[in-house]
Image (tube, rainbow, N blue to C red):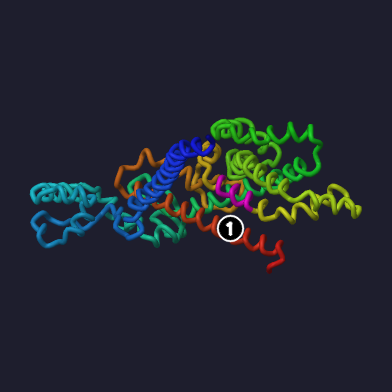
Amino acid sequence: MGIHRGHRARPIEWLAEKFIFLVSLSAILMVLLIFLFVAREALPVFFGETNTALVQKPIPAAELEKHSAAELQAYLELTPDEFAKMDKKTLRTLMDIKVEAQNDIPAEVRNDPDAHINTTEWKYLLHSHQWNGYNRPEYIWQPVGDIKKFNIIPLFVGTLKVTLIGLLFAVPLAVGAAIYVSQLARPRVREIVKPTIELLSGIPSVVVGVFALLVMATVLQTMFHYQTRLNAFVAGIALGFAVIPVIFSIAEDALTSVPRAYTQAALALGASRWQTAWQIILPAALPGVFAAAVLGFGRAIGETMIVLMVCSASVLSWNVFDSARSITTTIAAEMAEAVAGGPHYRILFMLGALLFAATFISNMVGDLVIHRFKLKLEGKR
């Protein structure tokens, strides 16, 4: 009877296994398609195929046959699919419109030296440039106006500044709370504190952002007496509240998974509970604690709403009390205003690709460090 039931259950188990496999495969494929889409939209910037020069050398319609398809496509700012669908008559019409638009540019703009440069070239994206009207070279992100400036250094500095402030605030508190809950707290206290901290992860980011905007910014300005009310320091502290539950949960699991024999041996040798937790349990759980910090970094660098609500000015400054703008907030705030297929649109996708690359590299480095910690603790290195 048991064998018969087993035979009848196998097709159901097989179907369940295949269903789970298909769901997992579809999730992986969806993520891969997202990456491919982002890469496709960002590749024109990486390969230098975008041009934001306001004043360009016009190509008369009579010279249509003298230029290659790639040159005409770049000149008319068309996608490959759009260019392939157009006949020569339509292309000549677009070229005439382009010439008329160049002729209609005001003389003061035409005489501006910045109107002749392509601001999406890498030297303008990564290096400072002395723009017309400025006394010295500057790093400027300014995607509006006649001369659009897309220097991405202020965005990377702002992202790094806010993320590091959030981690410096969140990691000590989260790890300290994890040590207390897993090693020092009484069972009744543990049953209350642990769910309470983990429930913080259920608070929407917009709620934390509103609290930081209306309450936290005023309180911190009163305490530290800085000039700019909304700045990277406030954003980082607010970001820390969003990161604490993630780091706490993983660190607490790592500390709890340390064998009880470690604690019992240390207590038997006369160590206090605090000495045992700090000098025995924490080093043994260090790979898991470091993994929690790495995941907290990924959570912090990808946060959008909190930073967007608290500070959003792209200022290149390492002063924590100055405003800042992260990459994620830039994409969220400007994507709806960017013309699809235009240089600004492509730059935003390029920022997303760079952010993914930075997160991927940081996770790889974190994984290597965790592996080294494990080997060291196991006595293999």
Taking depth in this image into account, of 141 and 80 the one nearest to the observer is: 80
Q: Is residue 250 visible?
A: yes
- Residues drawn in magenta: 291-299
Counting from the top left corner in percent of width and height, residue 231 is at 58, 42
Residue at horizontal 62 percent and vertical 61 percent from the top: 371
SS assignment at label 1: helix
Left or right of 286 on screen, residue 210: left
Q: Nearer the viewer, residue 93 or 268?
A: 268
In this picture, residue 45 sits left or right of residue 181: left
Identify the residue at image location x=75%, y=51%.
259
**Observer-nearest of 377 and 65:** 377
Q: Is residue 297 magenta?
A: yes
Quadrant in the picture for residue 227? top right
Residue drawn at point x = 62 percent, y = 52 percent: 291
Task: Give coordinates of residue 301: x percent, y percent.
Answer: 54, 47
On screen, residue 363 above or below 24: below
State the residue lying farthest toward the bottom: 381
**Mark 1 surroundings: few (<14), some (14-19) or many (≥20) residues within 10 A:** some
**Residue 67 drawn at (x, y percent):** 14, 61
Q: Which quarter shows the C terminus?
A: bottom right
Q: Amino acid at mark 1?
A: Asp
Judged left or right of residue 1, residue 149 is left
Q: Main secondary structure of the magenta part?
A: helix
Residue name at image x 71 percent, y 36 percent: 194
Residue matched to label 1: 367
Percent x, y of residue 188: 79, 32
